[in-house]
Amino acid sequence: MMRILYLSGGNLAKKRGYTVHTAELARNFEKLGAEILVYAPSLGRFKGEGFRIAYAPTVNVRILRPVSFRLSLGAMLFFRLLFYGADIIYVREIPLFLAPFIMGRIFKKPTVIEVNDVAIDGFIGRPKNVFSRLKFYMRKISFLLSYRIIVANRQAKEILSEKYGICPDKFAVIPMGVNTDLFRPMDKNKCKDVLGLKEGVNYVVFAGTLYEFQGLRYLVEAAHLVLRKKRNVKFLVVGSGAEEKKLNSLVKRKNLAESFIFAGEKDYGVIPYYINSGDICVSLVTPERSRSFSFPLKIYEYLACARPVVAGNIKNASELLKRTVTPVVEATDPGILSNAIIEILECSSALKAESEQLRRLVAERFTWQKTAEKTLDLFRSLQK
């Protein structure tokens, strides 16, 4: 049985993409016969089961939080390797933290790093300010010391290889996925009834964390143009985050409060009901973010529910996008974004067959089980 130590720097109590990613991958490692131990900061407890978690003591004071976590995690990792051992050290990138890679070399254990954002503090490549440059060089050292670097798409591989001078062969492109048992097509009206939403209303749904880079302000700017032609439409925003107050204020300034529903943060198992209540789902990012991030998890989740998707400013190539049912548009232009939303709303029933086709493609190729299988294959290749 392969023993994997999976290091994650995220607070697993938060309902965020990194929590979903960590939990789903860990669960599927276990299902495939591996023994997994996840390390995470002791800022909150994960509400779920299926894998073991060791919480690294972390002082929950802003200035002390990153230092205390790294020190305690380094000590726990050293103790684990010294007395119990492991087969693989798998690191979901933790900036300014070289301990796993150094220990991997000392104990002769393959260390693999997973990188989900090629940028550092908004910079792609060598940044100019001192702290960001420190992150850049420490990241390069972690790349050099790691056995493999996992990225979600070829664009990330090409950028990181060029900017850090790393051999392309050291990268492994493994797409992320979706839980297709949870995210599946359901009856729209039944889902609306469960959530207390109105029948006969067309819902445009966003489900995710409300960060500035999500570009939801573009949706607010386009909303009044949509409502001019389609009055019976509401915009349903599911999630919370740093940008929530700003978005609420912008909606009120635009006199759109009656057309927007901010549902707040919801449990993972409830999200499919919101997605299936929608006639169309959106995934938008800022142009800056589009150059540096992995393919959005939410798009897999939308498509697994067989819902049409308007993707804004998504530059990463994917066979799932740029179809009639999944147009990619310049979301910074309210006219373009609103027209894409209106066109799909007006022919959503005609797109059902294509939506179901994409659902099948996602179920065949982009599940968390597939991600875990490919990752385990990579781990096995490093043990030969």
Image (cartoon, rainbow, N blue to C red):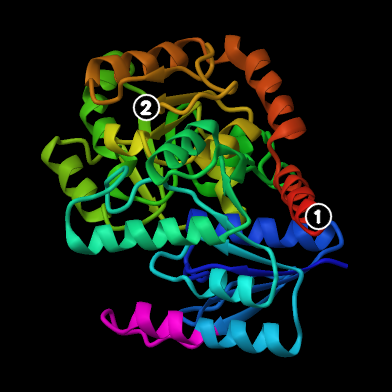
Q: Is 8 drawn above or below residue 67 in the view shown?
A: above
Q: Is 260 drawn above or below residue 338 in the view shown?
A: below
Q: Is residue 109 at all visible to an observer of this figure?
A: yes
Q: Amino acid at mark 1?
A: Arg
The answer to whether 92 appears left or right of 379 in the picture is left
Location of the N terminus (image quadrant): bottom right
Viewer-proximal residue among 89 and 175 = 89
Q: Is 124 drawn above or below residue 305 in the view shown?
A: below
Viewer-proximal residue among 161 and 307 = 161
- Write the residue at 55% across / 38% down: 168
- Write the residue at 57% across / 27% down: 307
Helix, strand or loop for disc 1: helix
- Write the residue at 70% across / 19% down: 357
Q: Is residue 276 at all visible to an observer of this figure?
A: no
Question: Nearer the viewer's eye, disc 2 or disc 1?
Answer: 1
x, y percentage for residue 107? 68, 77
Q: Please give the label number shown on residue 192.
A: none
x, y percentage for residue 273? 58, 44
- Quick one: label 1, few (<14), some, or many (20+) residues within 10 Å? few
Q: Is 24 drawn above or below residue 296 in the view shown?
A: below
Location of the C terminus (image quadrant): bottom right
Q: Please give the label number shown on residue 380.
A: 1
x, y percentage for residue 106? 63, 77
Distance between mark 2 and mark 1 Cα atoms: 38 Å
Q: Amino acid at mark 2?
A: Gly
The answer to whether 173 appears left or right of 228 in the picture is right
- Write the residue at 70% across / 45% down: 371
Q: Which residues are magenta?
A: 56-72
Residue at image mark 2 = 312
Within the magenta stretch, is there residue 366?
A: no
Rendering quarter of residue 60: bottom left
x, y percentage for residue 295? 50, 37
